[in-house]
Amino acid sequence: MSELLEKMAESLIAGKVDEVTELTKQALDANISSKDILEKGLLAGMEVVGKRFKANDMFIPEVLRCAKCMHGAMEILRPLLAESGVETAGTFVIGTVKGDLHDIGKNLVGMMFEGAGFKVIDLGIDLDPAAFVDAIKQHKASLFGMSALLTTTMPKMAETINAINEAGIRDQIKIMIGGAPVTAEFAKEIGADAYASNAASAVDKGKELLGL
Ligand code: B1M
């Protein structure tokens, strides 16, 4: 199993979209769990990509190919991760804040919630506070999550929480935030209910917030 997942991580780092998709199918055929494929194959590769990008050892077009690999594999894994969910635990609205186009982590968080039995309304990226407020109201969500990957877009999280307060719906919704530059201290500072450092702990925190 580890050989196949190592190869998957290497292919993702090399930006081989078709190969990553093919290896994902092969791994499933070999009865490797979708969770292991995600964590030990895809995320392991993405971690290396992040480090290389930071060290200027990889550049945006290459990183975009890696993101495409991740998206391709996620298309296959999403329904399988969701299958493990038993019943709708609640409605979770999630999106990436205004000015921020990063969506890989946010997508993973959404997928994990689907897997935990939530109805997930993924609004996408680059969302202004009003779009979040409208979706929370429209879908009668019990849990709301924001993702930000840039230090420059983190203040948009505070703006969104202010908009939720102003809309008079703050007491109807639990709010969780996350993303690489976000911290628990920041969450507290802006009045979010919780912070999670990764997709798996996000689900635990979300359930905890809802008393599930
Ligand atoms: Co961007 N980028 N990027 N980028 N990019 C970072 C974030 C950066 C840290 C790279 C670096 O310089 N070291 C840096 C930010 C620096 C900063 O602000 N401190 C950066 C920059 C500067 C930029 C641009 C400005 C580059 C430029 O144009 N000069 C630009 C900004 C565009 C914009 O958004 N307006 C940009 C663009 C891009 C790409 C488009 C090329 C691509 C995004 C593709 C896509 O998402 N579709 C990209 C990528 C891929 C990255 C890195 C390499 C990887 C991000 C990622 O997907 N990680 C990233 C470097 C890094 O993070 N080390 C970087 C994997 C993902 C699984 O992790 O998103 O952290 P993450 O999600 C985790 C947790 O954070 C958590 O769970 C997830 C899974 O465990 N989590 C939550 C996330 N959201 C959560 C929400 C929750 C709870 C947990 O509750 C709701």
Image: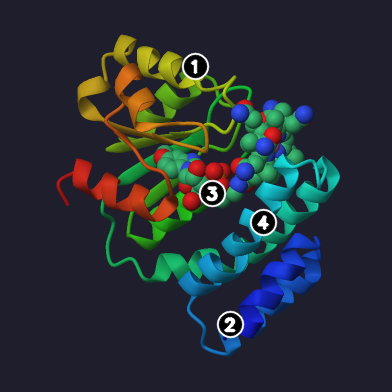
Residue under the image location 79 percent in, 41 percent down? 56
* Label located before the other in sequence (3 or 1): 3
- Foreground residue among 95 and 148: 148
Q: Are marks 3 and 4 in contact (CB under 8 Å)?
A: no
Decide if residue 101 is in sight here: no
- CA distance separating discs 2 and 3: 25 Å
* Label located before the other in sequence (2 or 3): 2
Disc number placed over residue 2 in the picture, else none: 2
Residue beneath label 4, please? Answer: 48
Of labels 3 and 4, the one closer to you: 4
In the figure, is residue 33 to the left or right of 162? Answer: right
Question: Please, is residue 119 above or below residue 22 in the view?
Answer: above
The residue tagged with tag 1: helix, strand or loop? Answer: helix
Residue under the image location 40 percent in, 70 percent down? 83
Disc number placed over residue 107 in the picture, else none: 3
Disc number placed over residue 155 in the picture, else none: 1
Quadrant of the frame with the N terminus: bottom right
- Mark 4 neighbour class, 10 Å CA radius: few under 14, some 14 to 19, many 20 or more: some
Q: Quadrant of ligand 1?
A: top right
- CA distance separating discs 1 and 2: 41 Å
| Residue type highlighted by circle 1 | Pro
Percent of width and height locating residue 10: 73, 69
* Label located before the other in sequence (4 or 1): 4
Percent of width and height locating residue 39: 51, 66
- CA distance separating discs 3 and 1: 21 Å
Q: Residue furthest bottom?
A: 30
Of labels 3 and 1, the one closer to you: 1
- Mark 3 neighbour class, 10 Å CA radius: few under 14, some 14 to 19, many 20 or more: many
